[in-house]
Amino acid sequence: MEQYTDLSGNPIELTFDPEEFRPAGHVLIVPLWQGKIVFTHHKIRGIELPGGKIERGETALAAAVRELHEETGASLKSIALIGQYVLQMDGVSIVKSIYAGEVEELLPLPAETDTHGAILFDELPDVQNDPRFSPYMKDAVFERTMRQLGLMAD
């Protein structure tokens, strides 16, 4: 398990080892479409990867598919659990499962959503220094996950 801190100094543990995964309450999705990462533009936080809370009675996989569609309009061709991270904040552990998916098509957004929809970049943006990106994208989890997926050089 790798250890980092977020921008507020909260500890983060990140793993890509399935033997270390545990039940999660949240999901994060790295969707790829035509070789590009599909980001979402959250109405308040800015550009980020799709994700969110797992609803009662819902599996993490179902939540990942739902959140991706709600935030980007994307439908998936395939999806796989690739990692997990745990954020310790105010004495609470927030466990997020990380999925990578291949987008089949980008459809219109559902009527009610917290986002402005999908955002695509021709090249992987400099998330750390671009003020358009959500603060949640600026910890080591994004960069380390991109390296794990081979989308960013070491």
Image: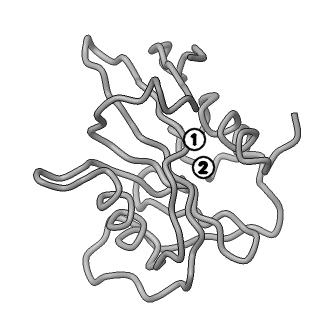
Depth check: give the residue in front, 5 or 69: 69
**Image side of residue 80 versus residue 35, left or right:** left
**Image side of residue 107 versus residue 34, left or right:** left
Residue at 32 percent across and 43 percent down: it is 26
**Image side of residue 69 versus residue 36, left or right:** left
Residue 133 — which label? 2
Which colour scheme appears in the figure? one colour
Residue at 17 percent across and 53 percent down: it is 55
Residue 57 position, x and y percent, is 11, 53
Quarter of the N terminus within the rendering:
top right
Residue 106 versus residue 142 in the image, above or below: below
Residue at 45 percent across and 48 percent down: it is 28
Residue 121 versus residue 152 in the image, above or below: below
Q: Are marks 2 and 1 in contact (CB under 8 Å)?
A: yes
Q: Amino acid at mark 2?
A: Phe
Q: How far is disc 2 from disc 1 in space, using C-alphas? A: 7 Å
Q: Amino acid at mark 1?
A: Met
Depth check: give the residue in front, 62 or 39: 62
Q: List the residue tagged with mark 1.
A: 137
